[in-house]
Amino acid sequence: MKKHQYRVTVEYLADADGRPVDAAPLQFAAPNHDDIFAIVARMRERSTLSGDDAARFVVGLKLMSEAMLENKDEPLFVALKPHFGEFMKTLKQPR
């Protein structure tokens, strides 16, 4: 299956007390079967979430769901799978 290619970079800007943190960014490849940018745009249009919250939600969800698809037999995901499927059906329903 062809996949869109993404690179995710997380920069640690400050700790919980607001102090700057000097840490190397966390960076990894994150191929995905979906166009994450298009999904973020749709979520921003149709959701009550703020723009940043919509982006965080979609990116997190797509990263997790692709890992689940690629590792179907991982015991960690077995209990989540049926609930996740129901959640995705609800999410994809027209509003």
Image (cartoon, rainbow, N blue to C red):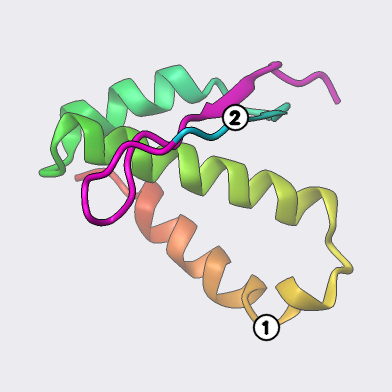
Estimate the x, y position of residue 70 in percent, counting from the top left.
Answer: 83, 48
Residue name at image x 22 percent, y 55 percent? 17
Q: Considering the image in quadrants, where does the N terminus appear?
A: top right
Which residues fall within the magenta stretch? 1-21
Looking at the image, which is closer to me, 30 or 15?
15
Cβ atoms at labels 1 and 2 below 8 Å apart: no
For discs 1 and 2, the disc positioned in front in the rendered view: 2
Q: Quadrant of the C terminus?
A: top left
Instruction: State which quadrant residue 33 falls in.
Output: top right
**How far across and down, in percent of the image, does residue 3 sit?**
76, 21
The front one of 89 and 34 is: 34
- Which residue is drawn at the image coordinates 65% and 19% (left, top)? 6
Magenta stretch encompasses residue 13: yes
Residues under labels 1 and 2: Cα distance? Answer: 34 Å
14 drawn magenta? yes
Residue annotated with mark 1: 79
